Image (cartoon, rainbow, N blue to C red):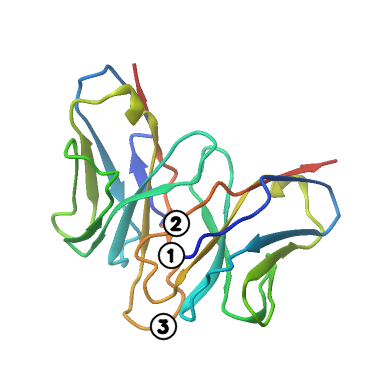
Amino acid sequence: LAKTTQPISMDSYEGQEVNITCSHNNIATNDYITWYQQFPSQGPRFIIQGYKTKVTNEVASLFIPADRKSSTLSLPRVSLSDTAVYYCLVGEDTGFQKLVFGTGTRLLVSP
Amino acid sequence: DTGVSQDPRHKITKRGQNVTFRCDPISEHNRLYWYRQTLGQGPEFLTYFQNEAQLEKSRLLSDRFSAERPKGSFSTLEIQRTEQGDSAMYLCASSLFLGTSGNNEQFFGPGTRLTVL
């Protein structure tokens, strides 16, 4: 499975847009990019998944350049409740027999 | 609540004791996964089932660990002769795998926090 690299932590303020970039230089042709969010003492929660270009849902946007060696999770107008750990995962969509998590990015949103 | 549930939420035990955790997945989901998470780290895969068949086990799953899903519904994870290094959050997740390309999102439960004294 492709290894991912993302910043250990990020700080932001309420109302700002937050962009978290993930590097996955060894991504394979069949791999999808998926982001999960985890609050303290809770299990991770799926945010968004994409293969190429741009994907948007009610929570976030995912930008994937043509070479797919990186991706950016964009959270518009964050609130205090967006304080969490965000994980970038790469793997085959049809499989995902196991999710391989890194250490994630700890996002702290301040008032 | 129709999400994934886990029981107990917290377990404190003494070294050498056996513990068993239960996971109830979302009812129509055919895949069930177990992960372990230690402080400051992301979850680590332990094993997963499709229906009642255990399809993959991580090398992290030593012979002291055993998981079952006897009727393809709930699952149990047992740890025998617990060690202090087993202290962690044990997470269960489930998904609906249809065998074709598509979103195979995993839905996680709240976890069972194990403390081994």
Comparing labels 2 and 1, the label whose residue is closer to the camera = 1
Residues indicated by labels 2 and 1 sit on the same polypeptide chain: yes
Residues indicated by labels 1 and 3 sit on the same polypeptide chain: no
Asked whether B3 or A74 is in front, the reply is: A74
Give the labeled residue for mark 1: A1
User: Crowdedness of circle 2 by 10 Å Cα count: few (<14), some, many (20+)?
Assistant: some
Q: Amino acid at mark 1?
A: Leu
User: Which subunit holds the residue at mark 1?
Assistant: A
Relative placement, left or right, of A33 versus B34 is right
User: Crowdedness of circle 3 by 10 Å Cα count: few (<14), some, many (20+)?
Assistant: few
Q: In the drawing, what numbered circle is on residue B101?
A: 3
Asked whether A81 or B53 is in front, the reply is: B53
Q: Position of residue A64 (x, y in %)?
A: 67, 75
Which residue is pictured at 64% across the width and 54% down the height? A6
Q: Position of residue B38 (x, y in %)?
A: 45, 35
Q: Is residue A46 above or below residue A58?
A: above
Distance between the Cα atoms at labels 2 and 1? 8 Å
Q: In the drawing, what numbered circle is on residue A100?
A: 2
Q: Position of residue A30 (x, y in %)?
A: 46, 80
Q: Position of residue B26 (x, y in %)?
A: 35, 60
Outermost residue, front side: A26
Q: Is residue A61 above or below residue B2?
A: below
CB atoms of marks 2 and 1 within 8 Å: yes
Relative placement, left or right, of A72 versus A15 is left
Q: In the drawing, what numbered circle is on residue A72?
A: none
Residues indicated by labels 2 and 3 sit on the same polypeptide chain: no
Q: Amino acid at mark 2?
A: Val
User: Crowdedness of circle 1 by 10 Å Cα count: few (<14), some, many (20+)?
Assistant: some
User: If you read the primary sequence from the N terminus, does the residue marked by circle 2 or circle 1 appear first?
Assistant: 1
- Image quadrant for the C terminus of chain B? top left
Q: Secondary structure at mark 1?
A: loop
Distance between the Cα atoms at labels 1 and 3? 18 Å
